[in-house]
Image: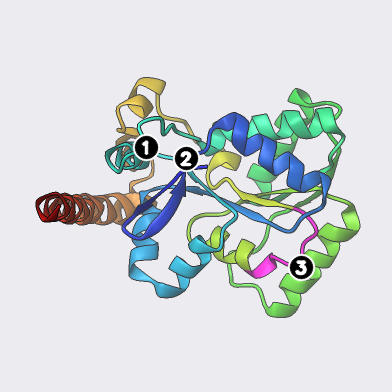
Amino acid sequence: MESAHILGMRVDATSYHDAVSRIVAWARLRDSRYVSIATVNNVVEAYDSRDFARIMREADLVTSDGMPLVWAMRLLGIPGASRVYGPDLTPLILGAAEREGLPAAFYGGTPDALARLLAVVQGRFPRLKIAYAFSPPFRPLTPQENQQTARDINASGAAIVLVGLSTPKQERWMAAQKGLLHAPMVGVGAAFDFLAGMKPQAPRWMMRIGMEWLFRLVTEPGRLWKRYLKQNPRFIVLFALQLLRLKHSLRQAATSR
C-alpha cells in the first residue's frame, strides 16, 4: 500500500474495500490495532505536537477522510488516491461485521446520540451483535477508568470497536488502549452524530469540491471556528511550502545528474 507524508504525517492510499478488508482481518484475529480517519485537523495537530505525531505514526492505518488530503496525496505522486470518509466507512464495517458474525462495540457520543445510533444500527443491521456501548464523560478518564473500560470491552466479546470522539481525543484514546483491547479500534469521529441523525451532513456536491468544512462551520460555528478558520489556512501555507521544497529538491537532483 502506497503512502504519502503530508507535513510529516503519513496518510495511506487505501480504499473502502481495502480498509474494510484489513479491519475485518484484524477483527477475526482479535488483533489490537487502531485506525485513524484523518482530516486536515489531524495533520496540523501532528505538525504542532510531537506526541500526537507519534500517535499518528503508530496508527496501523490512516485514511484520507477529507478531499484536501486526497488532493495533497495526488500532488505528492499518488494519482489514484481516493477519499475514505468515516460516515461512509462505518456502515461498510458494520455490514461486514454482520456477515462475518463479528460483535461490535461503540465508544463515544452523548448518551442521546449513542442511543439513537444504536437504534439506527439495529434497524439497518438486524443480525449484528452489539456487544458493548458506552458514552464516556467529557472529562479526561483516569488510568483506572481506562483500564476498566478495556476489561469491560474485552469481556463483552467485541471484535471491532468504533470510536466516536473528536480529534485528537479519539486518537489519544485508541493509542492508550492499544495492547489492552483485544480488537481493532476505528476512530470515526462525527460519524456517530451523522448516522444517528443528530447533525446534518453536507451535500455530496460540497464534499466533492472540498467545501464540506464550510457547511460544518455554518452549522457548528461555536465549536468548529478555530479548527477551520485557523487550521485550514495554516495547512494551505505549510503544504505549499512542502511542495516548493519538493520541487526544489527534484530540480537540484535533475541538474546534478
Q: Secondary structure at mark 2?
A: loop
Look at discs 3 and 2 and give the one toward the viewer. Answer: 2
How far apart marks 1 and 2 lie (CA) works out to 8 Å
Q: Residue at x 38, y 44 (%)?
A: 220
Q: Are marks 3 and 2 in contact (CB under 8 Å)?
A: no
Asked whether residue 198 appears in the rendered view, the answer is no
Name the residue tied to disc 2: 13
How far apart marks 3 and 2 lie (CA) works out to 28 Å
Type of residue at label 3? Leu
* Label 1: few (<14), some (14–19) or many (≥20) C-alpha neighbours in 10 Å: some
> Above or below — where is 91 with respect to 142?
above
| Residue 46 percent location from the top left of the image | 39, 64
Look at discs 1 and 3 and give the one toward the viewer. Answer: 1
Q: Earlier in the sequence, mark 1 or mark 2?
A: 2
Type of residue at label 2? Ala
Type of residue at label 1? Ile
Q: Which mark is residue 180?
A: 3
Name the residue tied to disc 1: 78
Q: Left or right: 106 with respect to 131?
A: left
Magenta stretch? 176-183
Q: Residue at x 82, y 52 (%)?
A: 30
| Residue 45 percent location from the top left of the image | 38, 63
